Amino acid sequence: QGHASPGIYARAFLDGRLSEQDLDRFRQEAGGQGLPSYPHPRRLPWLWEFPTVSMGLGPLSAIYQARFNRYLANRGIKDTSASHVWAFLGDGEMDEPESTASLALASREQLDNLTFVINCNLQRLDGPVRANFKIVQELEAQFRGAGWNVIKSLWGSAWDELFALDTTGALVRRLREVPDAQFQTYATRDVAYIREHFFGAEPALVELAKLLTDAKIAECFFTSRGGHEARKVYAAYRAALAHKGAPTVILAQTVKGYTLGAGFESRNANHQMKKLSGDQFRTMRDLLDLPIPDSKLDDGLVPYGHPGADSPEVRYLQERRAELGGPAPARRTHAVALPAPAEKPFQTVYKGSGSQPVATTMAFVRLMKDLMRDKETGKRWVPIVPDEARTFGMEALFPAYGIYSPLGQTYDPVDRDQLLYYKEAKDGQILNEGITEAGSMADFIAAATSYATHGETMIPFYIFYSMFGWQRTGDQMWQLADQLGKGFIVGATAGRTTLTGEGLQHADGHSHLIASTNPAALNYDPAFAYEIAVIVKDGLRRMYTPTPESPSGEDVFYYLTVYNEPMPQPAMPEGVEEGILKGLYRFKEGVPATADAPRIQLLASGTAIHWILEAQDLLAADWGVTADVWSATSWGELRRDGLAADEALLRGEERVPYVTRALAGAPGPVLAVSDWMRQVPDQISQWVEQDYTSLGTDGFGLSDTREAARRHFGVDARSVVVAALAQLARRGEVKPEKVLEARERYGL
């Protein structure tokens, strides 16, 4: 739970890992030395391993982390038998769909290396988790139904005496029927109220209450919970580790605000109570027997409590942690350089496909297949797909590498007699998750951070319908960035008009816009197969090659969009690698028909390159206009470079953005075209010195042919021609009537 971070910092302070100066800088990060409010590895990478906000991501990630630990072991990459994943969660958090979405997976795969501990204090921020119902019983039924081992640590030792006296079962019966909100109320009222409203429900309870002192009732109802007693907690812990064959959940009942006094405990408003008064602190100090004298409280400031580095208490804590393997939490990284894969797979792609049409989705899959054959790094690749492998042409990987299943294949697949049959294997390399993008992203995060979690560098690539990536699981991609994950995220069937027939819900024209909000994401929209090869090769270098500045490689990940529109793939021209990586290079220079022919620069990314190549020919043949064609592989990287140049200027440094330098001296205006919303190419407009405009696919997608969809959005080749003529007409370089003439000629 993110709000528990101050408690973790307090323990690190006792252990000597944090100083008073460190604690003073809690939530003061701007200077680079502060402590983050929640568990954020990117902000405090030596301490935090796993970010746990926003809520729901922690439990989902815990399941797939435990599963990935087994994956590493079953593939023979690392013995993870001693690893155990603990997720500390809140009962209110379990309302998040992600919290319980994969409970069945954990049970199916018998993940007894996983334990959930759910803090059942019965409260959310605003009020009870289940006001008129009972959250513990609900969670117990849910987890048992999913096949989990359920352990409950609900009642403290003070209750044991009451249960022993309950010879009629009336007490248990009453506890089962009282709704959570009412039980919360008992903890805030006096004993007389409890005697009347709890024990007064039936005669047997009235008689039981006569045997109890007010002090005993107060202890039971105000503070005595199983989640607060070391013996009860340890009993649950030991039982959880002893259970084999299924994951375990511990439901630990607590009091929100425990030990903070009557003004805090079980109060709905306690989330907004930021500090204790002097008297409230003294009450807590006395209850917990903290060695802080009143003289230390005279100025109204509460001092840090520390018994001393050489005190028996601190020595005990440090000795126990040393025996258990070191302090916790602790994030450990290892500077393990992956050898560069063989050059042959890249060279094959550089040569192009000749006259054979190949979609960039297929080109990417072929490259991955060849890289997985590499003797040095092949086993490090982790292909992840949410039940669309056949759509992306990945079925050839099934028999060669196997789909991971801890049970292997216990059945005879229906397509066993075919070459590309559905093969599951205990040591399978492919993670085919079924229809769960959230689960697939949790897979990716576990694999992308294995270099730190296990000291084993893995190279995940997750391929999916691009519409269902950033839009559906963008929160997890933020989590991935926070956790310093590395790998390749691939949005296939990309573009608003390229995936035909699927319609509004599938037609992606904005994932690059969402991706641009993530500082750790390097976003590319390659047009040709060779561009993909250059980007992947450089990505492997950047992410997995240690440098003095980045001992475990750069903490970035890649987002590539690929298309399902087959086109002949050209061979790579000479000298374009830098432009591909920086985001822009001139692909085809126009040949002027006359010395004074009007000229325009056409920029495009992804499949739109083919529209502007056709437009280039039409402009020359029909209108005497010369157009140069540029491939914009990354609007996002061009923007990142432009922002960096702006920041340098504020420091008094002269730096010209790459896009400005690349287009310097290029004659005529600039027209940028893509299968994305205009905002995507418009990211670079402020650094383009020429007149700049764009065409895009703003609006909802639709079901139709590619040609019809592109005409609808005004991005097909003939629409590009008209837009180019209009831009030139505004500059007085062609006659305005030519624009109308072109519209009529092309039927626009």
Image (cartoon, rainbow, N blue to C red):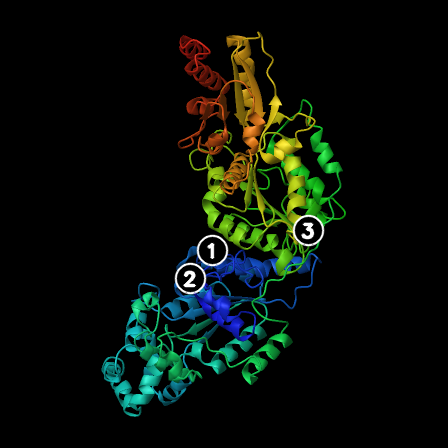
Residue 444 circle label: none
Which residue sits at x=57%, y=25%? 630
Establish if 184 lies above or below 31: below
Establish if 374 lies above or below 711: below
Which residue sits at x=39%, y=86%? 158
Residue 178 seen in render: no
Q: Residue furthest top?
A: 594
687 to the left or right of 580: left
Counting residues from the N terminus, which is met first, the one under dot 1 or under dot 3? 1
Amino acid at circle 3: Pro
**What is the C-alpha distance between the residues marked 3 and 2?**
39 Å
272 to the left or right of 385: left
The secondary element bearing badge 2 is classed as helix
Amino acid at circle 2: Met
Residue tagged 2:
94
Counting residues from the N terminus, which is met first, the one under dot 1 or under dot 2? 1
**Residue 302 locus on image (x, y percent):** 40, 75
**Residue 34 locus on image (x, y percent):** 49, 61
The secondary element bearing badge 1 is classed as loop
359 to the left or right of 340: left
Which residue sits at x=61%, y=47%? 487
Establish if 77 lies above or below 674: below
**Residue 211 locus on image (x, y percent):** 30, 92
Question: Which is in the foreground here, disc 1 or disc 2?
Answer: 1
Residue tagged 3:
546
Counting residues from the N terminus, which is met first, the one under dot 3 or under dot 2? 2
Q: Are marks 1 and 3 in contact (CB under 8 Å)?
A: no
Residue 30 circle label: 1
